[in-house]
Image (cartoon, rainbow, N blue to C red):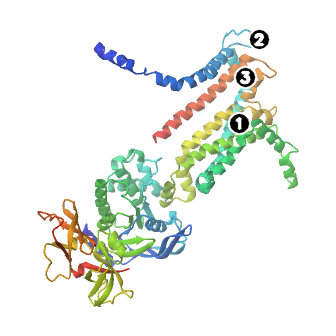
Amino acid sequence: MSTQVPSSLVTQPDAHSDKESPRWLGPLVLLGPSGLWLGLLLVIPTLLIFELSLVPGIRPGDIVNPSGLDNYGLIFQPVYFRVIGRSLFFAFGTTFFALLLGFPVAYWIALIAPKQWRNLLLLSFVLPLWTSSLLRSYAWITILRPTGVLNSFLQLIGIPPLDLLNRSPAVLIGMSYSMLPYIVLVLYASLEKLDRRLLEAAADLGANPLQVFWKVTIPQSLPGIVAGALLVFITSLGDFVDPELLGGASSMTLARLIYNQFIGATQNWGFGSALSMILIFLVSLAIALLIKYGDRSQVV
Amino acid sequence: MSQAATQNQGAMATDAGLDVELRKVFKEFNREMAVQGIDLSIRRGEFFSILGPSGCGKTTTLRLIAGFELPSAGEVLIQNQSMNQVPPYRRPVNTVFQSYALFSHMTVWDNIAFGLRLKKQGKAAVQERVQEALKLVKMETFAHRYPAQLSGGQQQRVALARALVNRPTVLLLDEPLGALDLKLRKEMQMELSILHREVGLTFVMVTHDQEEAMSLSDRIAVMNHGKIEQIGSPKQIYDRPQTPFVADFIGDTNLFRGKVEGFHPAKLWVVTEHGLKMTAQPLESGKSAPVSGQVVLSIRPEKIRLSYRPSEGQVNCFEGRLKNVMYLGTHIHCVIELLSGDCVTIMQPNTVAKLPNADTPLYASWATEDCLALTV
């Protein structure tokens, strides 16, 4: 930061870059296209939504005239608080069940299944992703409805029918199912890298299989578990299809509420935009945690 | 170090307890026999090495003792108790793994305390013993580092401390120094030897480095193709190899295939493939010649004398020409091509002022007792 640098030294880099292509050209070429894409389709729309969120009670065709934070004030009504709470509950629940179901599967494919079968097994878990999520939700309706596949089976073996559809359990089942392939892939990638000699070393030092699992396998795959859990959490927080089709009237979530403000009966774009900003804030918070945690696990 | 070895041997004579026994142990992987009927008895307090080329089954043997593999047939005993039904985590052994296998998510301290905490030792006891182990391997100041922040040699010490802190009956070492560079390796060899004397435990080490095995061990088992070729002290293995493989694998040697023409209690007359007549020492004096009459003769390069004139009274003396010379500093490594066409390697101390040229007739000779007849 010295001001006494001879001017010849200062101008030297410029003279140097005259001969070759300018230093900023490389980054521009590499980052430009995706930057343009993100700018046009993410940053600008987000800013537009933010602007809309500052207009109270705006309907299609109205003139946009930002006037304050009234829309955000609306959110503090208990009914909307409960919607946010329910969205978080579904997201946490889905994360929990996806982990609970996905970890054993990923563990088995990565560590126990014969090597030559691994890719096929993974493929079979990713296969549902090839169908539309809408279709998958309809399939769950067929299974879960009062006279559906599940209840017919339960009746057959003499168990009273379960009333799951149009309530929270159906939403959690549908969302966990949708998220399973993602979490299996992320956990598999993490477990596959697990150094098996560490498992042997732990056994050698006196750890029984359960202790090996809790003291070595879980800590060693923690970065993968965190990454997978956050991926599921973020995706399910904004999920619209499963709560809409499987949840019924009682399972109002943020995503459904936003939908209603823009396309549904209520038609209040300002409030819908404010809710969108809340959702973006919650998701960003989760991503910030992911980045922070991801970096720390790399240091260790 | 050799003094220590003899002291240990003296101690073992009074305490003949066996720590590890393998009885007719076989191990099969996918229809391939990795270990083929091994018998081993490792004495209490001994530094025992299993030496052999890669793929000879030495690591499998160690894993059978540790319990990571179960024998397809035979029995593994530790202190006279069968281990066949005992999982690794209940065996009184600890292993130092080839690439250390330290837990990267734990500090050095937590790595070393791992085994003690599992055994539900009190906090104070864990504290004391971890501290003691850190001191033993001179790593006190690194207790709160993570393995990734340590050099290879330091990781090696932590791996040693992590195993030793549990005071196992037997310490297993799988190529413990394999990943270190030469200088560090020599240093750690010395430390390992001192450590063995200090802790007084039975050490079983697997290595492919014959020098390492020779310098550290009380006894060595030489393995090849899943079988034990010979078990003995480093001196026995080097001076009295029982098989051509051992003679060839341990140190350098010159091997000649030949046929027994006649024998005497302490001597064999052998004619080699190329017609050289040699007198050789039978494996065990007083024993008759092998039934087939086929033998392999082994002569160590440093036992061969080189002269310009045929030496008087020397039975094994052959004319040849100098073919190749390698200057090794302390020694000179010469290859002499005999008139028969055979080549012999000779190790000469670096005292010769001038080496002869390739046309000068030379005579290579060796004594009967340095020419070992091994059965094929």
The chain letter for the residue carrying disc 3 is A
Residue B346 visible, this orientation: yes
Instruction: Read off the residue under disc 2.
Output: A61
CA gap, disc 2 to disc 1?
35 Å
Which is nearer the eye, B142 or A6? A6
Which is nearer the eye, A110 or B285? B285
Q: Are marks 2 and 1 in contact (CB under 8 Å)?
A: no
| Tag nearer the camera, 2 or 1 | 2
In the picture shown, does residue B286 fall above or below B58? Answer: below
The chain letter for the residue carrying disc 2 is A
Q: Are marks 1 and 3 in contact (CB under 8 Å)?
A: no
Left or right: residue A144 versus residue B262 is: right
| Tag nearer the camera, 2 or 3 | 2
| Disc 2 packing (10 Å; few <14; some 14–19; many ≥20) | few
Say which mark, if any, is on residue A77.
Answer: 3
On the image, which quarter does residue B244 sit in? bottom left
Looking at the figure, which quarter contains the C terminus of chain B?
bottom left
Secondary structure found at label 3: loop
Q: Disc 1 or 3, which lies upstream in sequence?
A: 3
Left or right: residue B351 versus residue A2 is: left
Disc 2 residue type?
Gly
Picture coordinates of residue B219 (x, y %)? 34, 72
Instruction: Read off the residue under disc 1.
Output: A90
Residue B167 visible, this orientation: no
Q: Please tell me which residue is depicted at 88% across the width and 45% down the height of the picture.
A: A147
| Disc 1 packing (10 Å; few <14; some 14–19; many ≥20) | many
